[in-house]
Image (cartoon, rainbow, N blue to C red):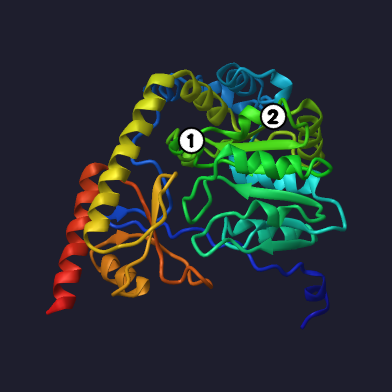
């Protein structure tokens, strides 16, 4: 080892979903929205004044903050915008999890959480989900340095009701509690209802799923003004100009078109329900999904075998080689036609295996 190598930080990084690029592929492995962004987004980008790109973007991201505040009926100082929810969450970990006590989160959840903890030297403890992948709220009554819960959870897709979350909040009012709601628009009531009752609550959402803008990288947090100021202080401590001009303009137009937003969500939920019915008919098991994906397992065929068989047909789903979930596949919801092709391929696979 060379002397300078000893000073390199070594962490186990988060592994993002594969981004294949095959003609006629069906990409169901990264929970992207199968429909394009709102029409207003396209118009705004087509009409963009090219000369604006020589100027720095607004460091406050004011136009988008204002539009989100209007949409959610909040004050502007209750909204923070970052470059995707991963960026927002990383800043939240830096801003809020600075105790010597461990941060708590489930043992099966978004796998970026332990990466950030290791990167920022944050102690943490994973709390085991039940056998059916549910949160046991009493497990979070213990002393801790903060809590983060993805709701709906990833990769299970399970949505916990607000009663469970509020109980956890009520028992942890001396630490920051983050509810990561990347998939909330496909589920039920948001913890946003609670932010004016609990000043230690931060709710994080994203444009990547329900607003069809994963490629623009827009995430945001909502909470009381003191918490939002803390996030901005962290942001301005290392990069004032975090979001580019095109993302700000596109994000504003995406929020404005509420009708299109709800139309896409309705279509995805409808397709998800049809896909669930088809998978059940083939013997698959899965928890009820509150997301834009299904977390499925089959008792008669290993998940990795199904994964590889689908890959040969250029159909991509996500596999996690991790304890407790290594026989499950996470299947993103595509268009009706894409999901029909998936089901047809699965039926052929099970017919061939039965010969």
Q: Of residues 265 and 5, which is closer to you in this image?
A: 265
Query: Residue lying furthest right in this view?
Result: 100
Rendered view: 132 above or below 176: below
Q: Of residues 242 and 172, which is closer to you in this image?
A: 172
Rendered view: 128 above or below 78: below
Q: Is residue 144 left or right of residue 39?
A: right
Within 10 Å of disc 2 (Cα), the crowding (few <14, some 14-19, many 20+) is some
Rendered view: 145 above or below 336: below
**Residue at left offset 45%, top offset 33%:** 211
Q: Quadrant of residue 45?
A: top left
Q: Is residue 283 left or right of residue 253?
A: left
Please indicate, yes or no, whether residue 214 appears anywhere in the rendered image: yes
Q: Of residues 207 and 55, which is closer to you in this image?
A: 207
Q: Is residue 267 left or right of residue 30?
A: left
**Residue at left offset 78%, top offset 26%:** 225
Asked whether the beta carbons under mark 1 and mark 2 sit within 8 Å of each other, the answer is no
Within 10 Å of disc 1 (Cα), the crowding (few <14, some 14-19, many 20+) is some
Residue 188's mark? 1
* Residue ID for mark 2: 195
Badge 1 marks a residue whose secondary structure is loop
Quarter placement of the N terminus: bottom right
Q: Is residue 189 left or right of residue 293?
A: right
Q: Which percent across, then down, holds residue 326?
A: 46, 71
């Amino acid at each position: 080892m060379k002397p300078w190598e000893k000073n390199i930080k070594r962490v186990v990084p988060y592994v993002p979903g594969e981004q294949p690029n095959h003609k006629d592929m069906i990409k169901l492995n990264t929970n992207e929205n199968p429909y394009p962004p709102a029409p207003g987004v396209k118009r705004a980008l087509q009409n963009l004044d090219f000369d604006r790109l020589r100027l720095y973007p607004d460091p406050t991201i004011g136009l988008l903050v204002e539009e989100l505040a209007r949409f959610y009926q909040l004050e502007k100082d209750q909204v923070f915008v970052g470059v995707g929810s991963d960026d927002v969450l990383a800043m939240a970990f830096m801003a809020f999890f600075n105790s010597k006590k461990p941060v708590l989160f489930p043992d099966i959840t978004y796998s970026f959480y332990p990466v950030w903890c290791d990167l920022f030297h944050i102690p943490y403890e994973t709390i085991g989900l039940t056998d059916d992948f549910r949160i046991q709220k009493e497990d979070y009554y213990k002393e801790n340095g903060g809590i983060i819960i993805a709701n709906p959870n990833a990769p299970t897709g399970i949505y916990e009701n607000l009663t469970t979350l509020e109980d956890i909040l009520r028992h942890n009012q001396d630490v920051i509690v983050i509810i990561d709601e990347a998939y909330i628009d496909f589920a039920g009531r948001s913890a946003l209802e609670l932010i004016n009752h609990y000043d230690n609550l931060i709710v994080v959402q994203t444009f990547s799923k329900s607003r069809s803008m994963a490629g623009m990288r827009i995430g945001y947090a909502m909470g009381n003004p003191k918490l939002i100021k803390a996030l901005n202080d962290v942001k301005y401590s290392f990069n004032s100009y975090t979001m580019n001009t095109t993302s700000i303009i596109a994000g504003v137009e995406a929020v404005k078109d509420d009708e299109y937003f709800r139309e896409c969500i309705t279509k995805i939920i409808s397709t998800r329900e049809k896909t669930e019915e088809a998978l059940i008919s083939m013997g698959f098991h899965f928890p009820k999904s509150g997301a834009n994906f299904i977390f499925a397992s089959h008792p008669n065929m290993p998940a990795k075998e199904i994964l590889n068989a689908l890959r040969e047909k250029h159909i991509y789903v996500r596999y996690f080689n991790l304890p407790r979930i290594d026989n499950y596949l996470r299947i993103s919801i595509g268009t009706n036609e894409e999901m029909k092709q998936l089901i047809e391929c699965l039926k052929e696979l099970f017919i061939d295996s039965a010969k």
